[in-house]
Amino acid sequence: MTTYPDVQLYIDGAWRTSAAHLPVINPATEEVVGQVPVATSQDLDDAITAASKGFEVWGQTPPKERADLIRAATALLRERQDEIAYAITLEHGKPFPQAQAEVIRGCEFFEWDAGEALRTYGRVIPSAPGVKYVVHHQPIGPVAAFSPWNFPMSQPSRKVAGAVASGCSIILKAAEETPAGAHHIARAFHDVGLPAGVLNLVSGVPADISGHLISNDAIKLVAFTGSTAVGRSLTSLASDNMTPVLMELGGHAPVIVCEDTDVDAAALTSAVRAMRNAGQVCTSPTRFFVHESIFDRFLGVFTDRAAATVVGNGMDPGVEMGPLANERRVAALTAFVADAVDAGADLLTGGSRIGTTGYFFEPTVLANVPDDARIMTEEPFGPIAIVNPVESIDAAIEQANSLPYGLAAYGFTNRADYVDQMVERVEAGNLSINTLEASLPETPFGGVKSSGYGREGGAEGLHHYMVVKNVSHSISIV
Ligand code: NAD
């Protein structure tokens, strides 16, 4: 097999080393597998200059050429699938087949946005003879983007695809814990001849980098995926220059399980999905509100399947769930469980760290969790599911909407009237019925309320990376 990549800064079309580095740690073994460079202020200034220069070139490049180049880079990423997936499993811990699938998902984001580059249509507004009103969509300019560690390939893909397809340049700061996906994206674009400065890659101390980049008025858009707390602070920084933001933030997704559903099928698919990526997914189904008439059966099947999850090193065949991404998550989840049990919740399975080496945590099911337990309002971001009984769909929808989050929500039912009520009343950017898939390249993804604003993917995906310009043109002077 291959080795972990030599991760460097990528600025103005050239790789750049750094005097200082941070270690990249394998969360399954706690071994150092690589290094990530710490950018200096000079590096960041150079990245801003490069992105400004890159935008002048790329913003004038025909959409067809942009799309062709994105597709060429994506073809390389597909060829390098196993090499990238191996690095992701090393740095993040997820099972190798899931890392392979994530690489393909990242490629699909690029391919979708490459197609959308050709469809950033404006429109002609009806007007009097001799007058034309034409609406244009134009790339917004250099973007500062920040992607998190839970999906090291597909998260940066979203940001780079949106920017590059729209004709923007981008400075990307990927998560320091998991820099391999972003490194490979930059490498692929470099190899196919992306003009210098269009894509720049930096890393280091997150708050230093975001503060430096966002305060510079050359940056015309801030795109961030991560926690609501950090998103709020970056939005506040951006407001100094009135810089628009694209924020994909936290969630705590409700699942409304109605009495008419196929209980076993719903419970089995839910238990698998709740443990996917060790629960470190912003759309992870976390709060199950189950009709009281099917509650016991749902809880039994769900708990048995969750407890049977094969946990281990993501490199080992058959493993379904790897470790948590870092030690902070182990401490956070341990505290959530202790608090819930203190508040009176039933701990059905799990609840503890596994072993002493690696950041492994047991698949955990909590039932009958009181509303005042912290985990009822704070996103667990780990392999913990809450399963509570409800007496009606009204009660379930009330619970679903009770938090400031509104990213993903789910329902299991075959009743059209229940679906209708969920569509009308559930506060979420993405509602999925009888499936726990919330986001595809071709569907718009994003939140409402404190889960952020703006959409990635779908026909809406490039909107945030573009500005609308209306041109009024009279043939004679009036
Ligand atoms: P965190 O809030 O410290 O960091 C989350 C991400 O934001 C990381 O990638 C980090 O590098 C980045 N970040 C942190 N401070 C930053 C700053 N000032 N400027 C720019 N980037 C910054 O939390 P964490 O302990 O790493 O992760 C736990 C929480 O993060 C979870 O509870 C979850 O809510 C959230 N999270 C969300 C997503 C998502 O997909 N929405 C992904 C990862 C983490």
Image (tube, rainbow, N blue to C red):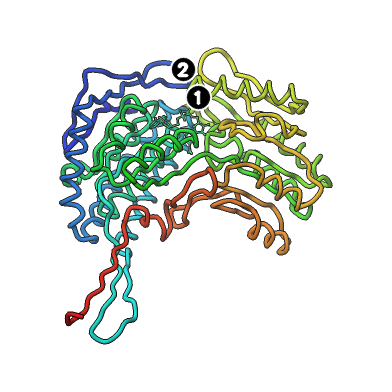
Asked if residue 69 shows in the view, the reply is yes
Q: Position of residue 4 (x, y in %)?
A: 32, 26
Q: Residue at x 69, y 52 (%)?
A: 412
**Amino acid type indicated by mark 1:** Asn
User: Which quarter shows the C terminus?
Assistant: bottom left
Question: In the image shown, does 244 or 381 lie closer to the viewer?
Answer: 244
Front position in the image: 319 or 174: 174
Distance from mark 2 CB to nearest ligand 1 atom below 8 Å = no
Q: Is residue 193 visible?
A: no
**As drawn, which residue projects farthest toward the top?**
356
- Quarter holding the N terminus is top left
Q: Mark 2 vs mark 1: which is more N-terminal?
A: 2
Label 2 Cα crowd, 10 Å radius (few <14 / some 14-19 / many 20+): some
Residue at the image point whose x is 29% and y is 34% from the top? 183
- Whether label 2 touches label 1, CB < 8 Å: yes
Left or right: where 125 falls relative to 325: left
Question: Which residue: 30% across, 29% down?
Answer: 203
Q: Which residue is identified by label 1? A: 313
The residue to which callout 2 is attached is 29
Pointer 1 local density, CA inside 10 Å: few below 14, some 14–19, many at least 20: many
Looking at the image, residue 199 lies above or below residue 121: above
Residue extending furthest front? 478
Q: 317 left or right of 363? A: left
Q: Kindly report the distance in space between the C-alpha atoms of the residues bearing marks 2 and 1.
A: 8 Å
Q: Is residue 280 left or right of residue 289?
A: left
Q: Secondary structure at mark 1?
A: loop
Residue 33: x and y in percent read: 36, 20
The location of residue 361, given as percent across then percent down, is: 59, 23
Front one among 163 and 108: 163
Point out the quarter of the image occupied by ligand 1.
top left
